[in-house]
């Protein structure tokens, strides 16, 4: 019953987003550059820590600040701070990409119809 009556309010959902949610995207960025995840996890943690120490959101750190943490950050790292791109990048089974979610919904409807 909850799902049937649930209504979402996009502006409120957008307001609830915070850039720290994208810390793993920062790690994934370096993975795409060939850095092992076990390393990128610590690097993105250092970025979060710096932002906290500076009293700013992680997405306001400059390229220079990021490169002081790890020189493998390049100018394109600033694209990491896009929530929609982050969601769409997760396109595996059960992922958050729109196509993945629609497939999950189709699977649920098919299952419900088979009962």
Image (spheres, grey):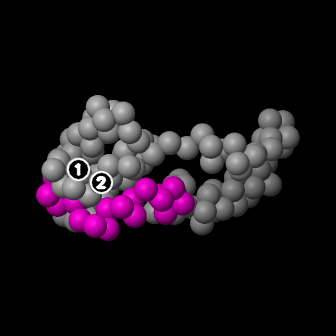
Q: Is residue 56 left or right of residue 113?
A: left
Decide whether residue 22 is among the magenta residues. no
Q: Can see residue 101?
A: yes
Task: Please provide the residue range marked out in magenta.
Answer: 70-87
Q: Secondary structure at mark 1?
A: helix
Cα separation, mark 1 vs mark 2, equals: 5 Å
In this rendering, the count of numbered labels is: 2
Q: Is residue 8 left or right of residue 26?
A: right
> Residue 103 occupies which quadrant of the picture?
bottom right
Answer whether residue 31 is visible to the viewer in this image. Answer: no
Which of 27 and 64 lies nearest the eye of the viewer? 64
Crowd around label 1: few <14 · some 14–19 · many ≥20 (10 Å): some
- Which residue corresponds to the image point at 39% horizontal and 50% vertical from the top-left? 59
In the figure, 49 relative to 69: above or below?
above
Q: Are marks 1 and 2 in contact (CB under 8 Å)?
A: yes
* In front of the other: 81 or 104: 81
Q: Residue at image x 17%, y 60%?
A: 72
Q: Main secondary structure of the magenta part?
A: helix
- Is 77 magenta? The answer is yes
Which of the numbered marks, if any, corresponds to residue 65? 1
Residue 36, position as x, y percentages in the image: 18, 54
Instruction: Count residues near mark 2 (Cα–Cα under 10 Å), then give few for <14, some for 14-19, many for 20+.
Output: few
Q: Is residue 94 above or below residue 77?
A: above
Image mark for residue 62: 2
Question: Would you place residue 20 above or below residue 67 in this image?
Answer: above
Q: Residue at x 77, y 50 (%)?
A: 112
């Amino acid at each position: 019953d909850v799902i049937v009556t649930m209504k979402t309010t996009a502006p409120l959902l957008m307001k609830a987003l915070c850039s720290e949610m994208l810390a793993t995207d920062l790690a994934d960025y370096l993975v795409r550059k060939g850095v092992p995840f076990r390393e990128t996890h610590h690097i993105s943690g250092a970025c979060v820590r710096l932002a906290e120490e500076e009293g700013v959101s992680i997405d306001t750190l400059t390229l220079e600040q990021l490169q002081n943490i790890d020189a493998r950050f390049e100018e394109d790292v600033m694209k990491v701070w896009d929530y929609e791109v982050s969601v769409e990048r997760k396109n595996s089974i059960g992922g958050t990409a729109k196509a993945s979610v629609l497939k999950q919904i189709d699977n649920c409807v098919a299952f419900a119809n088979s009962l």
